[in-house]
Amino acid sequence: MVRRESRARVSGGRPCAGCGRPIKGGLYCESCLEKFRVRAKVQGERMEALKTNALKKVAEDRREVIIMIVNNDERNLKLTSIILERNLPDYKIITANNPLTAINTLISREVNLVVLDADYNGLDMLRRIREDEKFKSVPVMMMSGSTRREIVADVFSLGVQDYVSKPCAPKDLVGRVNKLVGGKEETSTPIVAAETQQPKGSFRILLIDDDIFDLRQERETLKNRFPCDITTAQSAAEGMRLLENGGADLVLVNLDMPFVNGLKFLSLVNVNARLKNIPVIIMTETRDFSVISEINKSSAVGHVRKPNFSENDLTLVESNLRKRK
């Protein structure tokens, strides 16, 4: 500093704060100012690049399809994760082994599907999700090895997009997950929403019932009786989507379903110009005269008693199928 000041005095100016050269005014000489300008430009370009990369990362995260598996059994958690990671490489699979981690993940990330297991506190987690305004619309798949009707009823009352009975083949699980998050149809045959290989000249039946046990029984009865291709759905919304995409020769729909019941589904079919000529049979367990009378007044071609179809019920199904030929 002493040397800079002495040089500046000798030349009759003050020293540059950067290099010590004598200058007439200001703190820095032109050479130092130019260096600062270049440095500022480089730093600005770096900041812009960082900002651009950050925005790209945010955009990529938004496009990223995230599937979260929640299970407090480490073995089942790891097994499910491996199956999905190996078969769905385009999706990001994350795991949580407790409700707190799962909730924190839902808060911090945009999860496209939550996979729960009713045998390992899945019902409690499902209740937490549905009770929170932020998460109640998040799609949920429930897995379970239980055959207890009350558990199945609880699951569907809380709202799930799919219910998978265990044991489930890995190919079926992958297909159903892929359908939920990617909108792609399964290439394999799922346990519930099943489609049989359609023989030449067979009938196409759409069977809609929210009761998984009744659905299986009804499907087997029809399959054993008629040469038919049976598509199943567990809600009116799913049934309508399948009907619009693939059509059917006959629809059997359960009367008592949450949100949209059988008669409401029938009215939706009637207002659709492409679907209104498809015959619809209402399935019901009731013997209430007023309910039966309401069905008879509707445009349904008849009603059958579920889940054990009588011979008369099967005759009604057969006669309406024959009319479609």
Image (tube, helix red, strand yellow):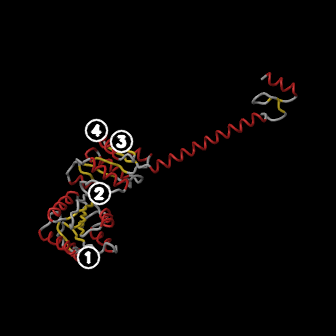
Marking on residue 96? 3
Label 2 or label 4, whichever comes before in sequence order: 4
Q: Are marks 1 and 4 in contact (CB under 8 Å)?
A: no
**Which part of the image, by quadrant, shows the C terminus?**
bottom left
Q: Which residue is mark 4?
A: 75
Which residue type does callout 4 highlight?
Arg
Q: Which residue is mark 1?
A: 299
Assign a secondary structure to mark 2: helix
Indicate which label's residue lies in the foreground, 3 or 2: 3
Label 1 or label 3, whichever comes before in sequence order: 3
Q: How many marks?
A: 4
Q: Residue at x 80, y 35 (%)?
A: 26
308 or 33: nearer the eye? 33
Label 1 or label 4, whichever comes before in sequence order: 4
Q: Which residue is mark 2?
A: 157
Instruction: Look at the picture and state if 209 lies above or below 276.
Output: above
> What is the quadrant of residue 7 in the picture?
top right
Marking on residue 135? none
122 or 167: nearer the eye? 167
In space, the residues marked 1 and 2 are separated at their CA atoms by: 29 Å
